[in-house]
Image: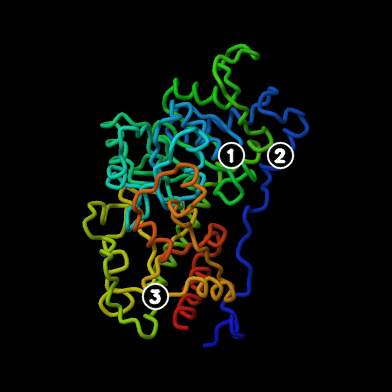
Amino acid sequence: MTLALHGGAPVRTRPWPAWPPPLDDAQRERVTAVLESGLWGATQGGSACAELAGAFARRSGAEHAVTVGNATLGLFAALRGLGVGPGDEVIVPAYTFVASATAVLLAGATPVIADVDADDLHLSADTVRAALTPRTAAIMPVHLAGSPADMDPLTELAARHGLAVIEDAAQAHGATYRDRPVGGLGDAGVYSFQASKAMTAGEGGLIVCRDQAVHDAVWSVCNLGRDPGGAWYGHPSVGWNLRLTEIQAALLLPWLDRLDTEIDRRNAFCAALERELASIPAPPGCDGGGEPGRRPASAGRDGAGEPGGRPASAGHDGAGTPGGWRPVTVVPRPPGTTRDSRHLLMLRLHVPVDRAFLLEAMAAEGVPLDGGYPPLGTMTALTGAGARPEPCPAAEAAAREVVWIRQSMLMDDPAAGAACVAEALAKVLTA
């Protein structure tokens, strides 16, 4: 079969769903009301930012929240509110967006770039433990692609060492860990409302906090050093104006009512694609003999088989090619996952492939994939600014082997969309 890249017919010509989706009536009504009120800024007396903060705090299992201009600023404000600054180190995962590290630099602290779990690509207690030093002040687990990090071992480790825990939940709106919402599991959790996220106002962010004192300190950082309830021109500490606008909050509030429906749709797509991937044959010349140096996805992990957690035999369950080997598998969810918000679907390739060719060929077939993150430790801008990378073989392997399906594609009809992805992958890998 001739690839579309070489003049053949593409697998798909119909466009994928757009993101963000069109405004709904509730959003139009709320935004219009704010615009007509003239109360556009968060300090003018409007209520939308306060409503959003309260609703998101409740949804995250926390008592308090602060809205901010974006999630990078949210991470910075959480760090500063928790007392992290110059001379401190903050452990961040190597396989994440660059802002997880640059927010630490913005706070004046040193990002320590730790490796991730080889299977689920999240920061783990083991990888954190290897990066601890006497200067470590905080850890920043990232709920990557909408999958919750395995938080209980991380928070237990943090408690033993007196470390703050800041959850980067930028991609995980609505995700739960052992039936508890992410964001409210550490000392602070930060969400993003940037254009690609599950809830978006173009830009924006929100910080949730369990503790009143932490909230007040974070609020002060975001409000020019004022105290909550204090004098308008009283600035007992140093802070900045990091606020969200009422217009953005008005766009976001109605989204909370439809978030779960959208998560369900993305999960249905992912489940359908996992079934489709089981039938992709091994490309010519690949015997399915496994990957030297890589353990099976279920080896040595006590979360295997738990409800909502990683499949007990991801990629090795006897479906697909003889012996249970598959050329493409879904990156498994970390132990403890009870609801994955599926911001992205990460796929691992188990066959040698020219990634540039794969991405170009898949795009030509009408099924574009994303190449994913480079390891943070390979970014000279970060290391030149003082970030300290640990050895990160798992993140380096992910940069070679993992590709993503974007959120907008996951909003397509589950059966039809998943079939397109699997058909295009089979066609391109065979070539």
The image shows residue 398 at horizontal and vertical percentages of 40, 61
Give the foreground label among 1 and 3: 3
Could you tell me which residue is drawn at 47 percent across and 44 percent down?
174
Closer-to-camera residue (193/250): 193
Amino acid carrying mark 2 in the image:
Glu
Badge 2 is on which residue?
A: 29
332 to the left or right of 221: left
Distance, label 2 to label 3, CA atoms, is 52 Å
The image shows residue 313 at horizontal and vertical percentages of 27, 64
Badge 1 is on which residue?
A: 70
Marks 2 and 1 in Cβ contact (< 8 Å): no
Residue 223 occupies quadrant: top right
The image shows residue 143 at horizontal and vertical percentages of 42, 47
Distance, label 2 to label 1, CA atoms, is 24 Å
Amino acid carrying mark 3 in the image:
Pro
Q: Is residue 183 above or below residue 383?
A: above
28 to the left or right of 159: right
Q: In this view, does 45 lie above or below 337?
A: above
Give the foreground label among 2 and 1: 1
Question: Helix, strand or loop at disc 3?
Answer: loop
Residue 228 occupies quadrant: top right
71 to the left or right of 159: right
Residue 352: mark: 3
